[in-house]
Image (cartoon, rainbow, N blue to C red):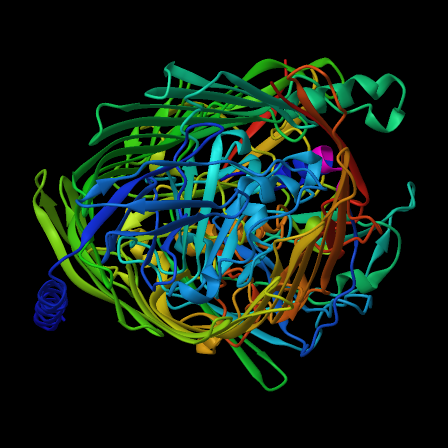
Amino acid sequence: MNCLGLNNLLRVFLLIAFLFFSERLSFAQSFTISGKIKSSESGEVLQGVNSLIENSSVGTTSNEYGFYSLKMNSASGVLLYSYLGYKERRLEISIFSDTTINIELTPIAFEINEVVISGNSHNNIMKPQMSLNKLSIHTIKRIPQVAGEPDILKSLQFTPGVTTSNEGTNSISVRGGSFGQNLVILDEAILLNPNHALSLFSTFNPDVISSVDFYTSAFPSKYGGRLSSIIDVRMKEGNNKKYVITGGVGLISSRLTIEGPVKKEKSSFILSGRYSYAGLIVNQVAKLKSTFPALKNFKSGNEINFCDLNGKYNIELNKRNHLFVSGYWGHDHFFFKNFSDNFSLDWGNETSTIRWNHIFNPKLFTNSTFVYSHYYYDYRLLKDTRNFIWQARMTNFQIKSDFDFYANSKVKLSYGVFSGLTVTLPGKISPIDTTSVIKPFSLNNRNSMEVGAYAEVGYKIWAPVEIKIGVRGTSFSEIGKTTIYDINPNNGSIIDTVHYSFGERIKTFYNFEPRLLVNFILASNSSLKLSYTGTTQYYHLLSNSSIGMPTDIWIPSGMKLAPQESRQFNIGFYHDFINDKLESSIEIYYKRMDHIIDFKDNADLFLNNKIEVQLLTGYAIAYGSELYIKKDYGKIKGWISYSLSKVTNHITGINNNKPYSPTYDKPHNLKIVMFYDISKKWTFSSSFALCSGSTVTVPAGTFQYYGASFNYYSQRNAYRVPAFHQLDISISYHPKTKKKLQSEILLAINNVYNRKNVFMLYSRPDQYSLDQSKTYKLYLYGIFPSFAYNFKF
Amino acid sequence: MLKNSLFLLFLFTILSSCSEEFNIKVLDYSDKVVLEGAITNEEGPYFFKLSLSQDLSIKKERLGIKDAFIVISDNIGIVDTLKQLPTYIQRHPKWLYYFISIKKYSGVIDTIRLIGGDTTYLRGIYYTTKIQGKPGNKYSLKIIYRNSVIQAAEEMPNVPVIDSVQFREQFLEKDGQNYFVPFLFFKEPKDQTNFYMFNFGSDNLYNLIYGTSHVWNFSILNDTYLTDYVSGFNLDDGASPVGQEDFFYFNQGDKSKIRMLSLSENAYNYYEALLKQFENDGGAYSPTPASPPTNLTGNALGYFRASAVSEIDLIVK
């Protein structure tokens, strides 16, 4: 693998060199136009803006820092800048040398009568990228959500290829991959647990997010480390022209954001907080116990809350240098007396990112990043003589540099180097006080180091054909300080124990991930796209449940666990129709994932130093097709997504060695989202979901043991729960005020026709007669109305 | 470790969620033999019960298996063929309750009071005639029932002596009263992992016949993280499908017995799996449910346990 990888890598570099120099020879006289594209309203950079020289095939797209660069082969011409939701700009230019053109685009106010834009830019056809869904925060905020809480991860569930084993949660599965195979990054920092409150809400505060890029295949080479998807979330930079305060009050949480210039048009900040008071609501319920006798045993004094703090500061140091510093801190606290006042659970993420943009020359843009990310949980056992605290920690540092090189009008090269260090304390317990009968115990650390490089070249072979070819090479080592046990797999006994000192390499893997994307433009409104995506995942999420828990922890590949690998083939047909007002696509994929993990029956994960003995590995095969039709223009906007898919896991030791469906295998998955702008004051949104039920493991029968009825099981996930379907609507009223204040009153109704969808099925002894086993279904909510108030001034 | 039911309750409260009974159609059900019972180091006879498993939907009466052949042998050469408990019952001449008489190995007669005169509950109960439980000995079981053969082997681990029990007064939120809660003191053997079970006699013949009340009074303990001398261990009271206080509590003047039993690692895992079923959520926030890992062969259910017993009398003063 190693030798093969290097060889191929060399070939790719030779190809790149060839492309680069061949172009150089053919065009002797030309100039480069480069610059940054920003919003005229906030001064924030715009990513993905098309810039095009009229009547030529020369065009480009701004990168994530708003930088663009294109080559002009004549001294004068017309430059066109277009971006969805913004007014198109035309610029007549005459240039005699390389020129910097920084440009501002003006957003189209959400006014109904205004003649709407330039028309379709055919991004979906012209750009090679496939399997990418860009969700704007505006769209995310319009999808009706429970308790009026806009949620990024829930919104992604309306896009093709996404299922979840338990509807209503954020544990998303993409094209047959588990939720531990999604790379969730916030300003380039990996979020190790992107969820609050038992995965019912995501950690993203919608007021501080600018965009989400969601890839289900054809990952650009700069991304790696997870098999199934990339969820690249970017924070706003903060308005550098004026102070803006945004906020909202909802049923579960409230939020407040302040942003503004530090030095006008040079530097700005954004600071945002969100606080959830779920516990307060629970305690209010407890106060009703004098009125409702049914609540007489309901206890108050519960503490359930979560909070997020986001902050970002950016400064344009000079024309060539720009610095961004951003941070996130989120924390959950869970102490729920009504079941047990015996424990409390705290967990949270902390991330910070420092980025430095540097423009070397009009063709070469670079960004260097330092990332720190930390995840922790504390489980406290209270009111018990075992009185202990159980903790785990995981810290990740990354340093990387990414380069965008605009070689000429046909070739764009992206390359970079990266390195990371991850330190994990998988678990330790310590007594809380002297009455505890527990002695301190700690699992061995699991540390790793990664270095790697990638290169990707985008090349327009000729006008209708563009290819993107890339490679990502990584070297990953599990390192000390730790102790590794050699385990007898039959009885779990320790055969040998080896100690490693800090930094000492235990096992190293080399991997080579090829990426290929080809776009054949068949007509101005249709194209055919092909891709191949190879990915490697070195970290395994040890989650032994279908939703996941805050106590799930990641462990690195090493002596006992090979990295997970996936290969995905993907073909897509993209077509725009009805005056190009509708964008559509059909994608068909086949994906094989190797070295995936699952757990033995009755696996014991608690403080287990021999955790690998509890795991079984195998492969999964996923395939499917996805239809997507989207309308981005007019009074009625929205999309329809339908996926037909199948995934099976093949793991020796599970389900009597027969293939089985993971819980998120849902063959049919239909999602419809519609937004209707009724008037300037009123807007309406609705969403409808219809998908196959998830697969669950149900008892094969029951038996009595000392008076209680217990279940026994035979086949894994052999029962499919009834289909899920739900209609959600929301209506917003934007009262007209003379002052600067803009406000929105939102009424959302989730589950309009009160369907009792299965959230989970479980069997346990009956509470009145232990000798009967009963199966119950839990549904999350019936018809669920909620209000929210949002403001901005 | 985490209480999954807690999360269900959280969902109830936050999202007005609800649960209701649900009927599952099971595809391929076939009867399996279930074994209950244990060898201990107390005086015999030891009792075992054989019954059949049940379909999820059919609510038939669970009857014991009458015509099985059971042999238990040990590593010192004793082979004991078990006898069926006679269904002959007696009635107390004065108080008119029904009872059965059990003759101990020593010849002492024990009586077990019955609920009513229905003898069908006594079906499927077998008892040993001579084999004696001793810590460190190995026991083998063989059951022949119709065409199937079920086997198991288990060693009886040691159990420490309970040095003392202390009562501490604790306030219970459920009714706002103070109760007495027992704390155990015992010395833990070093350099080996030990597994224990606690019960208040829930594994006796009466419970084998009639089952338990609304709490399944078995709790287990793994000594991996315990201090060498355990000074004041608060007993878990077992499991129940309804949220309860998690420990035993007494009023002043109460009398009871605490039994601490040794378990093999396998047996510990078995009971752990059973206890987890009380918190089963179908795999949403907990592992995918699986059959408890028994030591019985032949697709049988239940467990062949061998436990040493350490017992202490409680009088709450």
Picture coordinates of residue A498, whole percent (x, y): 11, 49
- x, y (%) of residue A215? 42, 57
A409 relative position to A705: left or right: left
Task: Report whether residue A765 is seen.
Answer: yes
- In the image, residue B5 lies in the stretch drawn in magenta: no
In the image shown, does A687 or A657 lie closer to the viewer? A687
Depth order, front residue of A466/A236: A466
Would you say the magenta stretch is mainly helix, strand or loop? helix
Quarter where residue A599 is shown: bottom left
Task: In the rendered view, tell whether residue B120 sits above or below residue A64.
Answer: below
Left or right of residue A434, residue B235 in this image: right
**Residue at left offset 79%, top offset 17%:** A287
Residues rendered magenta in the picture = B13-17
Q: Residue furthest bottom?
A: B147
Which quadrant is home to the C terminus of chain B? top right
Query: Does residue A326 sit above or below A10 in this rendering?
Result: above
Identify which residue, A139 or B12, lies in the foreground: A139
